[in-house]
Image (tube, helix red, strand yellow):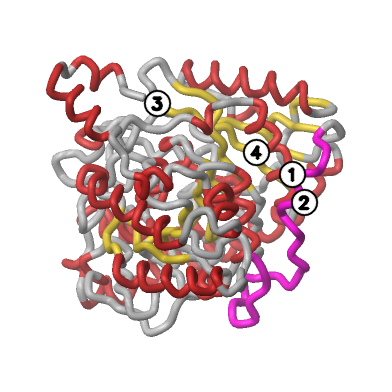
Amino acid sequence: MISRRAFLLGGCAAVAFSAEMAFSAEDDVALLSLAAASDRVRKKAVSPVELVKGCLQRIERLNPGLNAYITVTAEAALSRARELEADVQRGRWRGPLHGVPVALKDNIDTAGVRTTAASELFKDRVPSEDAEVVRRLKNAGAIILGKTNLHEFAYGGTSAISYFGPVHNPWALERIPGGSSGGSAAATAARLCFGALGTDTAGSVRNPACYCGVVGFKPTYGRVSNRGVAPLSWTLDHVGLLCRTVEDVALMLAAIAGYDELDPTTVNTPVPDYSRAFRSQTSNLRLGLPQSPFFDSLDPEIAKAVDTAIAVLRKLTASVEDVVLPPTTIPLDQIFIDVRSVEAYAYHSQWLSESPEKYGATTLQRLVENSAGIEPWAYARSRRELDLLRREIKKTFAAVDLLITPTMSLLPAKISDNVDEKGGLKYPLGIRNTAPFDVLGLPAISVPCGFTTSGLPVGLQIAGAPFADSAVLTLARAYELETEWHRRSPPV
């Protein structure tokens, strides 16, 4: 699929695009969904080595323009692929991720491989242990291709602020991919991996999923371990997934979900079989539309796409009605600001004192200025209100099963327009629709639901009750099967 902009560039661009489409057989396998690649590995129709080589070829060709990866572990990935291929030949199969190449946001620790958080401060940092989610992926047979670029220390929603340079949106290279997991989303959309892990504190999985036209899922707070992930806010951080389809998300989630006795944020509750969610009926689901503020002041093209998506959902479910979220004694956005700002400063305080020059200007500005003036009593009050809200929100789900909103209210800005002459952010990050679900700790997913006239993806957000992750996946998959948006590929 070639964009109008690329077409208008004329003959040279057409020749370049024709060469781009001349995929080798190995490159072509990288276009499969994770589920399809998994099935072929299990049936011995394709080898893990072929999958890795296909992704590496695309990384070599496309990553210079996207800047989605910071580190590519090509030799280690190929070596692991050969081991897993030998296991397949001996009839040993670890499950759906066996031999499937995936990527990791570069704030997630990897033993022996640098983990930079996209900052000069950590540019040479090499952890000695894997994060818990990495350990679980490896045990499930996944192959780690490398570490993806992000907004520095995950403290921003553009992925334009990185020591390693900005990430580019594969649908429009001059635009931001969203963030902070922009590299994971761009790599997934451009078929540089079969899926990726990201982190979500204010929408950092769902935001870039929306802008890059892929699926982004944030599980219930406590469902997945955060141990070994550089924190932004211990109370709000969620490890999430970026994939091409909802089915792919379910396969990856099954591998990383579960209690971690060394992580106090995780909850010891049984992990369901997420694949069974796709066999569940949606006809009895009751949907709620929290109109304000989620549907206020939407870009007209976003509003049109979301309205069309809701019309599809009406046919799939029992009812769709307006709902009002529980009132708060403190504005929800103030709760978010108080908690995130103080916890971010607490993690960085020593380095801010010792090496402030190793932070990017905007990151340093946000770490210092956002926490300034927040008194200890204000943080404690907001932290307690957050705990109360996470209990109170359960009452909303007595009347409805799932909440539906637009993922983002704004279209992605141009990278060149993102930072002012003083290094400050001037593009509104647009976390209004995503951050509330981090505060509430609810499972939430963004699925593609349309495109603008200029070819930019639009996302629909579905959120559920605490630990109703399966219900969220059930409706998201049903919607996906009724539409074709997830089948589109960016014109890189």
Q: Quadrant of residue 56?
A: bottom left
Q: Nearer the viewer, residue 82 or 96?
A: 82
Secondary structure under the numbered disc 1 in the rendered image: helix
C-alpha gap between disc 3 and disc 1? 28 Å
Q: Nearer the viewer, residue 455 or 417?
A: 455
Sequence-first tag of 4 and 3: 3
Which SS does the magenta portion mostly show?
loop
Circle 4/circle 1 CB separation < 8 Å: no
At 74% across and 26% down in the image, what residue appears? 322
Which residue carries the number 1 mark? Answer: 278
Position of residue 467 measured from the top left corner of the image (x, y, whole percent): 73, 56
Answer left or right for 266 relative to 341.
right
Give the amino acid at mark 1.
Phe
Q: Which residues are magenta?
A: 257-282
Give the amino acid at mark 2.
Arg
Give the amino acid at mark 4.
Ile
Q: Quadrant of residue 240?
A: bottom right
Which residue carries the number 3 mark? Answer: 456
> Is residue 71 placed above or below 465 in the rendered structure?
below
Dot 3 alpha-carbon crowd within 10 angstroms: few under 14, some 14 to 19, many 20 or more? many
Which numbered dot is residue 462? 4
Does the magenta segment cover residue 451? no
Closest to the camera, between mark 4 and mark 1, is 1
Give the amino acid at mark 3.
Leu
Circle 4/circle 3 CB separation < 8 Å: no
Sequence-first tag of 3 and 1: 1
